[in-house]
Amino acid sequence: MQKNRHSMLTSLLLVSGSAFVFGFMIGQPGWTVAIAVFLWALYQIKQFNRLSEWLLDREEQSEPPESSGHWGEVFDELSRINRRQESREKLLRNVINRFQESTTALPDAIVIVDANNNLEWWNNSANRLLGLNDSSDRGKPVMNLLRDPRFIRYFKRQDYSDPITLPSPAHSDLQIQFQITPFGDGDRLLVARDVTRIRRLEQTRQDFVANASHELRTPLTVIRGYLETFLDQELPRPLVRGLGSMHQQTRRMENLVSDLLLLSRLEASHHISDEQPIQLHNMVQNILEGAEQLSQGRGGHQFVIELDDEHDLTGQEIELHSAFSNLVYNAVRYTPAGGRIRIRFWSDKDGGHFSVKDNGPGIESIHLPRLTERFYRVDESRSSASGGTGLGLAIVKHVLARHGGQLTIKSKVNKGSNFTCHFPAEAVIKKEVEVVDDEPLIIHQEQSDNGSSHPSL
């Protein structure tokens, strides 16, 4: 453009100079220069009007007009810019067409929701899975079309780390998994996937495990009964050793069956049906008695109890007892004799927290993400010797999920492990103080004879 301005100035000077020389020759230099400049200005105005008309009618006339001189340079540059823009637009259209073709071919529903929560675009699968209509639903609020209260809560909470599975609004026999991903400036990408077949297979697996575990209960009970009867009699030492090992493995199988049945029941529902106030001090006291009995056969451990005296939890006591006892018993099993186990419950603005911390051998970080998987073993030999079933942490995970909580695990090799159950704030309640003979029943800490600390009445 700097070159073009210089060309215009040069053109003006040439026209003016030529007109001055010609006017001097005929004796009228002033008028000649004025007329020449006027004609030069008319030419510039004409070229400017041609440029304006082309800019206004670009859709009908793609190429700029032809000209010469400095205006020819301007029109040529505009022509090059125009061709580059058309090339970019063509490439962009191809990308958009490819995107639309690829998303149309997907079996999953893809929906774009704008910053105002309105439906902006979706593929053909969304019509089939979600019942959307291209002609009437575009631009409408997504929560007016997907009206399930569970989806509305999921959409509004802004935490989309985990997907949610709900019946399809278009076909009640289909199970749809919804996953939302924020992008852009407040926009969201909704992906809906048909997981009906996966859910049916999972239900078949759960039914099989539950039925098989239930059928194993009776024969195991019979075998254990006969073994206990034989062990009560005078028998040769090799036979006693063999029967004792059989009895131990039978008890282990019964524990495994019980855990499988409990896990199947927990998986059958993702929410608890009724909530009751739970006296955590009494529950921990009961768990501690079992932990101390387990500890006696392993050389003894030191127990430290720190419980919130003002708050309790609400939930299903049997399930929470199972979850907390699994964490405490695991700490006893894997902490060497004389080790320290700290059981703590506290509450804050984020909710309630129950933790079990030990100073045992710890766990390598590579194993931490998989600890809650069924039958996952960090060390097969050590786990078998401890007598665990491999289902304890899986039970803990499902119990917490049903109570709206989550489990966090922190561990370092040779530094110990810390398992913490986090509960939402609505699960924490003020402690109910029991009154006996008009005196409050106070729960406090006292030291046991073996040096361990636990709550007592």
Image (cartoon, rainbow, N blue to C red):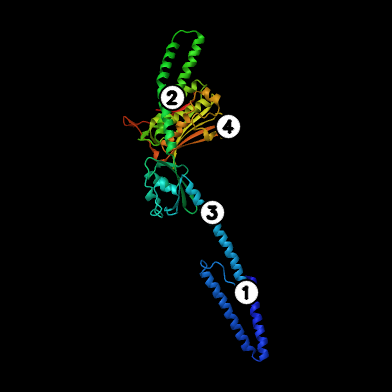
Residue type indicated by callout 3: Val
Residue type indicated by callout 2: Val
Q: Quadrant of the N terminus?
A: bottom right
Query: CB atoms at circles 2 and 1 under 8 Å apart?
Result: no
Q: Which residue is mark 1?
A: 68
| CA gap, disc 3 and disc 1 | 38 Å
Disc number lying in front (4 or 1): 1
Q: Quadrant of the C terminus?
A: top left
Disc number lying in front (2 or 1): 1
Marking on residue 413 = 4
Residue at horizontal 60 percent and vertical 81 percent from the top: 40
Marking on residue 95 = 3
Disc number lying in front (3 or 4): 3
Q: Is residue 187 visible?
A: yes
What x and y, as percent, mark residue 428? 40, 38
Q: Is residue 81 above or below residue 234?
A: below
